[in-house]
Image (cartoon, coloured by chain):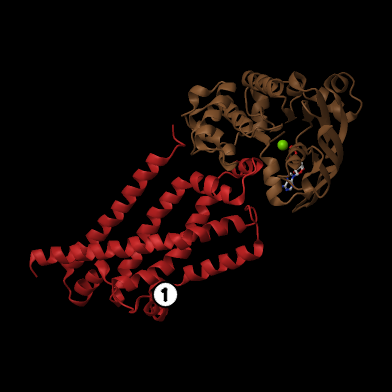
Chain colours: A red, B brown
């Protein structure tokens, strides 16, 4: 295979991977953020304590999180087909990625929000804040650094999942690595692909940490 | 008419080791414009009491009347509106760490939907009142404890309150700073006629600024009267214990013990 072919293949794969990872993380937050907020406020010491609802949400999150991604990928194929019309390829992979991302993100959001000082929440309540105000003006802004670190972790995790989806023709870098490295024994291409994945992972982390540092007002 | 009236207030906590009677049959009324002290040893129920005044804690029974309105009968929405005019300051300040000083002071106005520009102007005024206008753009982490408490006071003022509740507001501060914060509270009381309720375990705080004082002992109201009456002629063992065992050491040791939760 000519060098330029390899480059263009990797370039295409990187684009596909970025598309899958960014889209499913974004949609994942659309679901995971509200779910994480709900988990935070309905827990026993939350501002809308509701033990039954918390238990139910907690269970759903735990169950979905304990299904290995590859199994999930196959399990929900009918659903994926229903949503995007086919069950393989880059865009189709966004569906299982999002389904895996939501409970994972919800858990991280929950743990970030629970780090917010209870005293600050109480002060906000003492000033007559409604629940929405507590969530939007206190919980989320005060936890923003931790939330941002969470986004970095989510991107990394979903990047890993997206590579796994190569096994079922999911597209992207993982697909290339498996097709060339595993089926055709072209180890070099596999290694280069893995290197690109590592670089992407590093980039996410670097960007996330940089932004977190820039936004954090708790350092002088 | 009294601005705050408390009638037959009871509060019981369920804990792993059983029930804790934090408040038992508390009756008292606080007049408009007073600086009212509540003193007692650690665990006497002071924080529980003050948190019942704005229903951060719901009592098991009794009445909490603000201007004659029973807070316990209000809906959640009505209660929020009522709270918007009761300021509260805390031992550990509880400022929003990711907001500038100015935006911290804007917070109460923000939730009242005061127009942004107007809120900023007013916030600057409140910061001027507490002597911190030059710190408007700073973040809480850059301030000393005393400065943080000043911001908290400015934030309380931004509630345009008729009442300010203080729960151990000076207990994390050194004696010098404590005095300046108390002086500031007194000034606010005189300037705006705001009624102030001060919860403390420190005698000196009560001596310095309170008009009347209530002594809490194991969840009960042991004694109440003018500071002079209670301090010169304590009638109950509880008041005497407070007066004679606590030797008014405003020193570091005292502060440390507070931080380690002995008091
Ligand atoms: N949330 C709670 N759960 C259980 N017990 C509590 C709780 N808050 C306070 N208490 C108990 O109620 C009593 C009064 O506490 P508190 O009002 O904090 O006293 P103070 O402020 O005078 O030190 C103490 O015995 C304390 O342990
Ligand atoms: Mg206390």
Q: Where is residue A19 in the image (x, y as percent from the top left)?
A: 29, 63
Using a 10 Å C-alpha cutoff, classify the residue at mark 1 as few (fewer than 14 neighbours), some (14 to 19) or many (20 or more). Answer: some
The residue drawn where x is 56% and y is 33% is B105
Residue B26 horizontal side relative to residue B117, left or right: right
> Residue B44 is drawn in which quadrant?
top right
Image quadrant in which the N terminus of chain B is located: top right
Q: Nearer the viewer, residue B49 or A183?
A: B49
Circle 1 sits in a helix, a strand or a loop, which is it? helix
The residue drawn where x is 61% and y is 42% is A124
Image quadrant in which the C terminus of chain B is located: top right
Chain ID at mark 1: A
Residue A1 in view here = yes
The residue drawn where x is 7% and y is 67% is A2
Residue highlighted by disc 1:
A72
Identify whether A64 is placed above or below B206. below
Q: Where is residue B170 in the image (x, y as percent from the top left)?
A: 66, 27
Residue B127 horizontal side relative to residue A165, left or right: right
Q: Which of B214 and A163 is in front in this view?
A: B214
Residue B251 horizontal side relative to residue A63, left or right: right
Identify whether A112 is placed above or below A80. above
Q: Position of residue A147 (x, y in %)?
A: 45, 50
């Amino acid at each position: 295979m000519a060098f330029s072919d390899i480059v263009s293949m990797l370039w295409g794969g990187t684009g596909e991977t970025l598309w899958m990872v960014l889209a499913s993380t974004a949609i994942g937050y659309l679901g995971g953020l509200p779910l994480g907020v709900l988990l935070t406020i309905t827990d026993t010491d939350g501002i809308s304590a509701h033990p039954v609802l918390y238990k139910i949400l907690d269970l759903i999150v735990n169950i979905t999180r304990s299904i290995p991604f590859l199994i999930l990928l196959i399990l929900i194929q009918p659903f994926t087909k229903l949503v995007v019309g086919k069950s393989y390829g880059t865009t189709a992979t966004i569906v299982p990625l999002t389904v895996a991302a939501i409970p994972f993100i919800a858990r991280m959001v929950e743990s970030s929000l629970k780090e917010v000082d209870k005293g600050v929440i109480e002060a906000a309540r003492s000033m007559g804040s409604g629940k929405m105000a507590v969530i939007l003006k206190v919980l989320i802004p005060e936890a923003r650094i931790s939330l941002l670190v969470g986004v970095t972790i989510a991107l990394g995790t979903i990047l890993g999942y997206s590579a796994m989806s190569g096994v079922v023709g999911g597209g992207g870098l993982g697909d290339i690595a498996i097709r060339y490295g595993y089926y055709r024994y072209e180890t070099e291409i596999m290694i280069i692909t893995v290197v690109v994945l590592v670089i992407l992972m590093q980039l996410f982390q670097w960007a996330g940490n940089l932004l977190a540092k820039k936004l954090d007002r708790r350092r002088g | 008419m009294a601005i705050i009236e408390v009638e037959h207030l009871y509060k019981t906590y369920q804990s792993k080791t059983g029930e804790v009677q934090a408040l038992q049959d508390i009756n008292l009324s606080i007049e408009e414009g007073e600086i009212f002290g509540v003193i007692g040893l650690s665990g006497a129920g002071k924080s529980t009491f003050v948190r019942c005044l704005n229903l951060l804690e719901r009592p098991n029974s009794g009445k909490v009347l603000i201007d004659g309105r029973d807070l316990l009968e209000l809906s959640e929405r009505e209660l929020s509106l009522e709270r918007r005019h009761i300021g509260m300051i805390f031992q550990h300040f509880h400022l929003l760490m990711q907001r500038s000083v100015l935006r911290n002071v804007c917070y109460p106005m923000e939730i009242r939907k005061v127009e942004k520009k107007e809120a900023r102007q007013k916030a600057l005024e409140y910061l001027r009142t507490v002597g911190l206008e030059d710190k408007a753009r700073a973040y809480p982490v850059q301030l000393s404890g005393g400065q943080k408490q000043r911001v908290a006071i400015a934030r309380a003022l931004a509630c345009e309150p008729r009442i300010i509740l203080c729960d151990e507001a000076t207990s994390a501060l050194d004696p010098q700073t404590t005095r300046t914060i108390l002086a500031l509270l007194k000034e606010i009381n005189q300037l705006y006629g705001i009624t102030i309720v001060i919860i403390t375990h420190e005698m000196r705080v009560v001596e310095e600024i309170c008009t009347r004082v209530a002594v809490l002992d194991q969840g009960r109201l042991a004694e109440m009267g003018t500071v002079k009456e209670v301090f010169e002629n304590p009638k109950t063992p509880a008041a005497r214990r407070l007066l004679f065992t606590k030797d008014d050491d405003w020193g570091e040791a005292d502060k440390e013990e507070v931080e380690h939760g002995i008091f």
